[in-house]
Amino acid sequence: MEVSVIGNPQARICRAELAYRELGFRFGSGESRNRVTFCNQSSKWKEIAIRCSHRSVKCEAIVSDDAPPFLKSAPKPKSLESVKLFVGLPLDTVSDCNNVNHLKAITAGLKALKLLGVEGIELPIFWGVVEKEAAGRYEWSGYLAVAEIVKQVGLKLHASLSFHGSKHPEIGLPDWVAKIGDTEPGIYFTDRYGQQYKDCLSFAVDDVPVLGGKTPMEVYRGFCDSFKSAFSDYMGNTITGITLGLGPDGELRYPSHQHDVKRSGAGEFQCYDKHMLSALKAYAESTGNPLWGLRGPHDAPAYDQQPNSSSFFSDGGSWESQYGDFFLSWYSSLLSSHADRVLSVASSAFSGIGVPLCGKLPLLHQWHKLRSQPSELTAGFYSSNGQDRYEAIAEIFAKNSCRMIIPGMDLSDEHQSPESLSSPESLLTHIKTSCKKQGVVVSGQNSSTPVPGGFERIVENLKDGNVGIDLFTYQRMGALFFSPEHFHAFTVFVRNLSQFELSSDDKAADVEDETVSIGSGTGAPSLRTA
Amino acid sequence: MSTVPIESLLHHSHLRHNSKIYRGTRSFFIPCSLNLPSHFTSNKLLHSIRTSVGASSKHRRSVAIRASSPDTAVVETSQSDDVIFKQNFPVQRIEKAEGKIYVRLKQVKEKSWELSVGSSIPGKWILHWGVSYVGDTGSEWDQPPEDMRPPGSVAIKDYAIETPLKKLSEGDSFFEVTINLNLESSVAALNFVLKDEETGAWYQHKGRDFKVPLVDDVPDNGNLIGAKKGFGAIGQLSNIPLKQDESSAEVQKKSKSSSDSTKERKSLQEFYEEMPISKCVADDNSVSVTARKCPETSKNIVSIETDLPGDVTVHWGVCKNGSKRWEIPSEPYPEETSLFKNKALRTRLQRKDDGNGSFGLFSLDGNLEGLCFVLKLNENTWLNYRGEDFYVPFLTSSSSLVGTEATEAAQVSKHTPKTDKEVSASGFTDEIITEIRNLAIDIHSHKNQKTNVKEVQENILQEIEKLAAEAYSIFRSTTPTFSEESILEAEAEKPDIKISSGTGSGFEILCQGFNWESHKSGRWYLELQEKADELASLGFTVLWLPPPTESVSPEGYMPKDLYNLNSRYGTIDELKDTVRKFHKVGIKVLGDAVLNHRCAHFKNQNGVWNLFGGRLNWDDRAVVADDPHFQGRGNKSSGDNFHAAPNIDHSQDFVRKDIKEWLCWMMEEVGYDGWRLDFVRGFWGGYVKDYMDASKPYFAVGEYWDSLSYTYGEMDYNQDAHRQRIVDWINATSGATGAFDVTTKGILHTALQKCEYWRLSDPKGKPPGVVGWWPSRAVTFIENHDTGSTQGHWRFPEGKEMQGYAYILTHPGTPAVFFDHIFSDYHPEIAALLSLRNRQKLHCRSEVNIDKSERDVYAAIIDDKVAMKIGPGHYEPPNGSKNWSVAVEGRDYKVWETS
């Protein structure tokens, strides 16, 4: 009798935990999975073996009964099994008065996601909300409240530290920074018409003490330190990832389209603020071409013009000239050194807490089929002598032990308009390959608005065994996300992810010719069995 | 030893297992093996531990099962260098005190009687009582005459008295209060309940008030005590687990015919009755555990200290390899250790010198990952930590984890079955975790049955859908960017599939069978019965009856005891008769269910009315937390608040369960066919779906009434936002009910009053109300008891009512006709329109083509067979192949039909 007191609780736990697995839902043992997936492949195998062994005889019984295929369990190592799914919270989750917006909706939504088997939540944390009032005065209460909810629901949290502003919903840079910007407009990116992009500081001021005697990097460092101490209780348990904002919308790029939402053209160079121009001038003088340092390219097309409409980006145009190489090398070097600065500030701030850091790249797929790839050039991605421009960036990530987030995993070539000469698929493959070469772990995201066939495309991307993507963040929670149509599609997507892993169980456990369909069907060749 | 305690332990470990996994996997463990080095029993260590325990463990007696405040200081910091784990676990032992309540009626002298109520268990007892006077009906209380109130009594509003019980004498454990009865007054009975302010528990008699009759003809609802009832009177006391049942209850009854007091009270007899009660009292103790790493031997030294009284045995094992499985470490073991069936070790803790508790030291090998244990107090009492084994992890480093974990009360399970899942501060997470676990438990128990697995899986999916719908509706209300198309699509997809769900046949015509004054006669049900034949011959198919429950307001919308169906409209029997009568003539009957709020029976300790009585004796957990007037302890409201009464927290499982039961009971007992749901703005539509799924109404309609939009006092042409809110609500119920089309009424108001008939076509050429978007769920109406009748909160333009009826009785949606209009001068015209609707078989999904919507005339053709126009302007239906003949005609309206 007394034995059962001792023995049974554990047995029950195992069984209950297994029951979760049965449904393909992932919770309960999330922590160990986390730890594992950040390690290399071989240790994962080991971990799984251990887990199975301590799960007592009972699990055998469950596996062997003939439940419907997708209810079956027994984790087997395989590509999709290790993909953890995150969902982004609304950008305005915390208002600039540090209130939690749509609290009820978020709470209900989190519960739904938890039940669905989602691993965690991405939370955008805005500089302009936390350090709104004055330099060094941090107000974390709103975000802490969200972290607590996430923790209590039992989800993981991925914090995105956003040093940029947003237009929809409108969240600016901190008030005190904006005030400085009013008198010192040079801190913002500026285009050749003198228009400022006020949602992000210019890369040229990274190490210039423009913020009340401090450099932006020092301010970011203070922000990271404050974040680390405010959330110390959550680090490593609830918070399993931190993303550093690297530029406009958090992505590592110049705001080459400023706020031109249509993005019909290739964008424009943003090198016309005071600091950029003086840096350009200095660079030109140091390379012996002082005349090249007076302004940016004169023959680049305007925002709404086709890239080929003027000579800069056309075949044999300025971009291929010596001047082009001069300018683009300089322009892109500011981008990569900005990435390096931010990531190294962060990796020193967060060293020793065991939470992986991430940075996000843009997927500049428009005009990718043009030889000049102008969208990438205006955004700052260039490498002279035909070197791999993404590999250079990946190297910086590798140096700082950062993971790379690549968005647009839902985009497929066939849904792009032919005029835009766009190719998201090939660009994505390119970046992934560059990362692989440098040993940078890739996480996926979708583009912010749903696209036709998006979910199928995501599944295909995740199944791609070439580059193991183990984390995918779906953007973004909100009314549209929970609308009956979309949420249904999302549910199917989640199930497809788990069905994929389970279907090959089926094969392992035989069941003859009965093949289980796998979501999209197009990815059959990459289906890997255990 | 019974299996009960084991079960409850299991239950708990189950509920809590998630956090266990959590703790287990977070830390890095190092392996170890066991030894007991003598140098660690050094006085210094023991001394320091003992002091700290002495400081932190006050032996408290407190009540209920709530988490006590965490104690943090456990071990002196001076030696925390090598401390790898320290935690103080507060534990509670629940002791059950058993005793009795007694009620004694005694004649002191001629014409002087006294009633004593007492309890043998210590507590802060309060008698909460009132009287009924001769001639009172119903279950309401009145205040007793002044001279009956014992000293120290406090009046509670105008109907009750609270009198504390006093110790009979010092040293005596009995508490008692005595009331001197005033037999000159016309008191017919004395009603009371007992309250223990210490635990907040209410003690009732068979789920009702105790009632001591003082005259002969007190109606017996099964809760009488004394005189006439004898042995049968002793029954279940509602709040407490009862061990004995009545057969074994000790009952003494001395009945001595009281000589001849007063004529009407000649049968008053002395009696004495006892009822067993029990009360759970929690004892707070603590267990503090400190694990240290011995630098010399790299052993882990665990010390366990507790102030639990008596012999305490630690039942323990060690963990290796990341699992929490108990394993037996290698020898040597501490003193007084025995091996238990090769599965665990048992070590009796040594009593401390001062007698206050005991302690033990365990030295374990450095490469073990942790120590698991439970405490055994005696054969039947096991003690675990919040339903799980205590667990002491041995970390690799003494860094962040030390002592950071918040501690909550551990619980002891004894013979008492677990009371209930106490909702903690983090209510909602508990809820979800419980949900998930329940689902998992279900899965587990049915794991061999495919169908059940499927069922459970469906349950989960449904739960997910429900939550998503909730999130959607809130997000959407704050993001007004949703386009209309998607709503139309959603509509096209969803509703029309399940025609049966709460929407009747589609050919229903509703009659609102009362107005604001109907309660005045006291016999409305009977009056209505007489009209049954006439209403049936007019062509009505559904009748909406007034709210049937006991209510604080005579109209019935302030319900109190939901199971008391005697109201100002008549008795429950008259109600049942009425329903039967209408069924006989082929009319379905809707009950008016007020689910948003409920009036309380009692005040809480702050004097706020939020405690309920009657069969559904909910406490303040049933009241939403965000209305400061009622100090609810429930969750925040899922909708708007109705401020005159406590709003019910529908997110509570017990509330929903009770409401479902009640609705089903009303269906069964009264014979209702469906529901009109009052003030559904007050709570989330998803709960309504739940209720509809449980009660399966033939027809149901909710009142979602909020304001239309106006700009500078002028009604906006576009009322999409308004109808959207109603559609959202219907959507939240998954289309299980319809809703009153308030939008249509509002637009009709302006269109008719200001001669702006163009308003009756929306930009897409459809009707501008809910009926234009989701006709099968729209219940169109022009007046009800609130908007019209003697209240007139939002009266339809006078004199233009028939235009309104010409519109709603020809258009899709389910029309509802107000009682006052039927029995007015409009009777013949309404009758003609009703007859036309039935003759032409117009229904809730009929197709409407708007032919004209101009300043002074609106015209439409419905299902190609009925044409109508309202407004002073001219209209004739198109002369085509159809042969139109005038069917009904009146002031500013005209209706044609094809022949």
Image (spheres, rainbow, N blue to C red):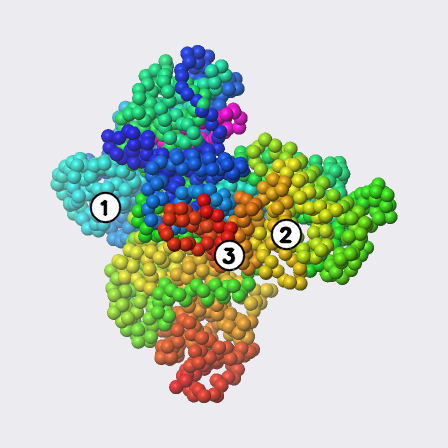
Q: Which residue occupies 43% across, 88% down?
A: B883
Residue B700, placed above or below residue B811: above
Q: Which residue occupies 21% across, 45% down?
A: B224
Distance from label 3 to label 1 (Cα)? 72 Å
- Contact, CB < 8 Å: mark 2 with mark 3? no
Q: Which residue occupies 53% across, 47% down?
A: A465
The magenta region covers B391-413
Q: Nearer the viewer, mark 3 or mark 1?
A: 3
Residue identified by numbered label 2:
A427
Lateral position of residue B228 relative to residue A440, left or right: left
Distance from label 1 to label 2 (Cα)? 80 Å
Marked residue chain, label 1: B
- Amino acid type, residue under disc 2 in the picture: Leu
Residue identified by numbered label 3:
A522
Picture coordinates of residue A104, whole percent (x, y): 49, 49
Q: Camera-side residue: B806 or A465? A: A465
Q: Which residue occupies 86% across, 45% down?
A: A290
- Is residue B403 a member of the stretch shown in magenta? yes
The answer to whether marks 3 and 1 sit on the same chain is no
Residue identified by numbered label 1:
B223
Lateral position of residue B485 relative to residue B464, left or right: right
Residue B61, placed above or below residue A135: above
